[in-house]
Image (cartoon, rainbow, N blue to C red):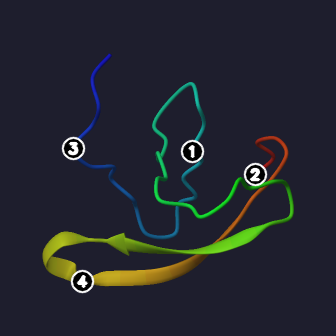
């Protein structure tokens, strides 16, 4: 298995993350998460800057 160096996001086109394709591995959480929980995540777009966002934990992929 190889890990991508980056994920390309296209403006105005949704991008779903799932365990069977590209996905994010989040480390450093202070406690386990469950459906309905939220946490802040900063996305790094390299030379284009960083964006803070809120992650909403879901039971299953639904979007």
Q: Residue at x 46, y 53 (%)?
A: 27
From the image, tell me which residue sits under label 3. Answer: 5
Q: Quadrant of residue 43?
A: bottom left
Label 2, secondary structure: give it.
loop
In this picture, residue 45 sits left or right of residue 39: left
Percent of width and height locating residue 53: 54, 79
Label 4, secondary structure: give it.
loop
In this picture, residue 21 sits left or right of residue 35: left
Q: CA distance from mark 2 to mark 1?
A: 9 Å
From the image, tell me which residue sits under label 1. Answer: 17
Q: Residue at x 75, y 51 (%)?
A: 63
Q: CA distance from mark 3 to mark 4?
A: 17 Å
From the image, tell me which residue sits under label 2. Answer: 63
Q: Nearer the viewer, mark 4 or mark 2?
A: 4
Look at the numbered discs 1 and 3 and tell me whether their residues touch, using CB distance below 8 Å: no
Look at the numbered discs 1 and 4 and tell me whether their residues touch, using CB distance below 8 Å: no
Q: Residues within 10 Å of mark 3 (few under 14, many from 20)?
A: few
Give the total of numbered labels. Answer: 4
Image mark for residue 49:
4
Residue lying farthest to the left in this orientation? 47
Look at the numbered discs 2 and 1 and tell me whether their residues touch, using CB distance below 8 Å: no
Look at the numbered discs 4 and 2 and tell me whether their residues touch, using CB distance below 8 Å: no
Label 1, secondary structure: give it.
loop
Of residues 52 and 30, the one drawn nearer to the viewer in this rendering: 30
Q: CA distance from mark 3 to mark 2?
A: 24 Å
Q: Nearer the viewer, mark 3 or mark 2?
A: 3
Of residues 12 and 53, the one drawn nearer to the viewer in this rendering: 53
């Amino acid at each position: 298995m190889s890990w991508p160096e980056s994920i390309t996001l296209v403006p105005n086109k949704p991008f779903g993350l799932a365990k069977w394709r590209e996905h994010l591995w989040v480390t450093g959480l202070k406690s386990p998460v469950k459906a309905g929980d939220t946490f802040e995540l900063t996305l790094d777009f390299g030379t284009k800057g960083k964006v803070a966002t809120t992650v909403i934990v879901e039971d299953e992929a639904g979007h």
